Image (cartoon, rainbow, N blue to C red):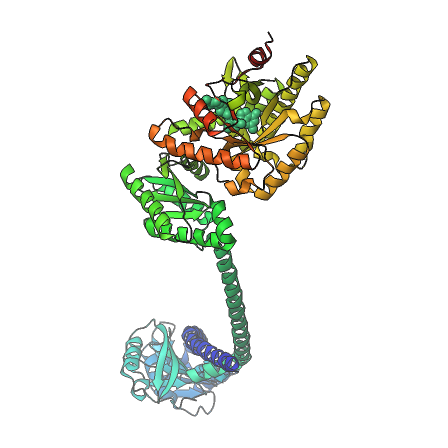
Amino acid sequence: MAFTVLVLIVSAVATFTYNAIAKFNIISNEIISVKAFSNNVALYTDMRFKEAIASLNGYSVAFSDADNMTDEEITEKLIYCADNSFFCHIAFVDDDGRTCTNGEMGINPRVYAGTSLAGSMNVAPGANIYSVPVHSSSGSVIGTLVGKLEDNAAANASFKAYGVSGVTYILNTDGTIINCSNNTASGIAAGDNLITVLSDENDINLIRTHLSQNDVSDSFKVTYKDEEYILAMTSLDTQAWTLVSLVPCSAVIDFYSNITAPLNYMIFGLTAVFVILAGYLFYFTHRVRKTAEGIIDENNKINYVDDITGYSSWKSFMENYDKAMLDTGTKRAFLALDIDKFKTVNDTLGYEGGNEILRKISEIIERDIGDNDFFARNGGDHFFMVVEYKNEKEVTEIVNHIISDIEYQITEIKITVSIGIYPITDANMKIRAAADRANLARNSIKSLSESRFAFFNQSMMENIREEKNIENIMEDALEKREFVVYLQPKYGLGDETGEVIGAEALVRWYHNGEIISPGKFIPIFEKNGFVTKLDFYMFEEVCKLQKSWKNQGLRPKIISVNMSRLHFPNPDFVSTLKNYCDAYDIDTKYFEIEITESAAYENINILMNVFSEIKSAGFHVSIDDFGTGYSSLNMLKDLPVDVLKIDRSFLTENADEEESASKIIACVVSLASSLDISTICEGIETKEQASLLSKLGCNMAQGFYFARPMPVKDFEKLVYNLN
Ligand code: C2E
Ligand code: MG
Ligand code: MG
């Protein structure tokens, strides 16, 4: 309803405005048009005057001998002239006052003859009586011919326009109307003085000025008795007169209004339609915009807000990074933060609890970094930050702040984090490359080290390059059999002291005349998964050895082979090992499968299944590097394990710590023994260590003190005395 009223108001206002503008334009245009009419009427009037004069002049010749003619003769000629011209009456008046006419004229011709007797033609006021001088053959003026036209030139000249008759006046120089068209609608008639009937000073002055000129052509608006008129003035050629045309403005407007009435309705209608359309258009664009804004808001939320932390997303981080890189004058560092053992956090607090920790860490980072700094979570527990700094000390302070805030402000569980710092040196550095460098720095932080942050250095990059190189050649190396089995003997302690009771197969890579140790490539193969291929390869190599010893009738030794945790998800893992044994016809009991403890912790259920499977296939199972991971002693009772390999980190060279270390080892050994699990200590380098372990009840020993890992040939020589 309100909209309809609005539409009507707007349409009416538009139409009214249109009309007001249109009227103004009409009058402005018609002022010019009326001048053109006036000019034409003046031209016509002049033409009529000249025609009449020329006609009289022509007849005047017939009277050049009038002095010698009788009145009858003159009258006869006058009748002839009148019959053959536009003049209804013609009179001859000579300088003595003799007057002859063609008939009753109704006027006194003598009154009009004066000027012409003086030698010039004349058009009398009233404009339908003309006179010309009559010359004798000698050239002297002997009389005058006076002609009266039946119609009035000015009256004839009045024009029809705008549906009314315009009024035409002929004015003499003082403004008196000496002739007037038949139509005198204005009420101003012949004999009136136009200047005195008008009241507006400006109108009067303008008209007066024009009357004093003899080549006027102008038009303008005048006011007469509160009504507006368009008045046009044009000077006539024939006499010092001015032709004036007068049209009431109301007639012009009425005339156009009649024409434009349908147009008005159209404008009204069109405006209404336009306003309705505009209204709907506005409504729909408003709705579309609102919906679009909603979608954009939602998208922005999805794109720019991390759904877990509620802080900025990785996408927004990337955009901020690109923007920050444009400003090359500021020093910035790229930081990579990871929560140490986040899995434990999740296992302890549950998924939601873990998310809450991520949120709290985000809050702390947001608080601790500067206004121009930015950060985002990049999946899991990985956070990246870009912070401005002036010197290394400053960035260290920021990082220490974050680390201590996280450690002290998060109280649900003990949280430690590691932060890698890469000071951005190259403004063209891509975000991925900067993140890789910060990650490298972070990865260099050892789990047990004091410092929880590290700066990137170039050697880390070299490690990456080396990693790439290794990855490029590993498959080829396997094909070329560059991976070689080394064996490190295991010795019995106690009763069996000095006897090689088995060995651990350790891989060595013979490459370009160099021997590369597993510490360099196993972690890389763990990352890229190649380790599983290598393990099977090593296992088969050991099978071959066992086979060869068997074939030689030698007493088999239990050889332990390291197996990566990456095998666990493979359901064929154990059966593959078993197949190798079958293929080489070696009993599985001559193999021990070493699984490192870190792997042992991660999922106790999977671990139990795999261990059980290995055991049921007849293999021995050992937990390698026991004591470095997080497995609890309690867990041991559920795991089908044959051997615990106590990590060499328990062996300390520090005498003060020796006692406590001994107690731990004694404890582990006694627990293992109670569970029927054998113990072996790795990394024994001294006689003292050996005797201590022997004393503590450890069953076996492995270490440089006894023997280093060695090529098969050396092992065979040592154990079987083979050459
Ligand atoms: P690990 O299984 O714990 O092997 C024992 C490591 O201790 C060997 O290092 C051995 O050379 C070293 N070692 C032995 N006695 C001593 C000692 O008295 N002092 C010192 N400082 N070190 C001693 P290696 O051969 O460099 O192997 C390192 C690790 O690489 C192995 O640790 C094992 O985890 C892994 N590895 C080696 N070969 C393989 C393999 O074929 N497959 C898999 N998955 N991992 C392997
Ligand atoms: Mg091992
Ligand atoms: Mg070990």
Please, is residue 631 above or below residue 579 in the view? Answer: below
Q: Name the residue: 43% across, 21% down.
A: 685
Q: Name the residue: 56% across, 14% down.
A: 715
Q: Name the residue: 64% across, 37% down.
A: 612
Is residue 370 visible to us here?
A: yes
In the rendered structure, the answer to whether residue 172 lies left or right of residue 24 reads left
Q: Nearer the viewer, residue 305 or 6?
A: 305
Q: Nearer the viewer, residue 464 or 589?
A: 589
Q: Position of residue 293 (x, y in %)?
A: 49, 62
Is residue 468 visible to us here?
A: no
Q: Nearer the viewer, residue 610 or 190?
A: 610
Q: Quadrant of the C terminus?
A: top right
Q: Nearer the viewer, residue 592 or 672?
A: 672
In the rendered structure, the answer to whether residue 119 lies left or right of residue 493 reads left
In the rendered structure, the answer to whether residue 613 lies left or right of residue 178 reads right
Q: Position of residue 132 (x, y in %)?
A: 38, 78
Q: Quadrant of residue 476?
A: top right
Please, is residue 314 above or below residue 481 in the view? Answer: below
Q: Position of residue 401 (x, y in %)?
A: 32, 46
Q: Quadrant of residue 721?
A: top right
Q: How many marks?
A: 0
Please, is residue 96 above or below residue 220 in the view? Answer: below
Q: Position of residue 34 (x, y in %)?
A: 43, 76
Please, is residue 32 above or below residue 685 in the view? Answer: below
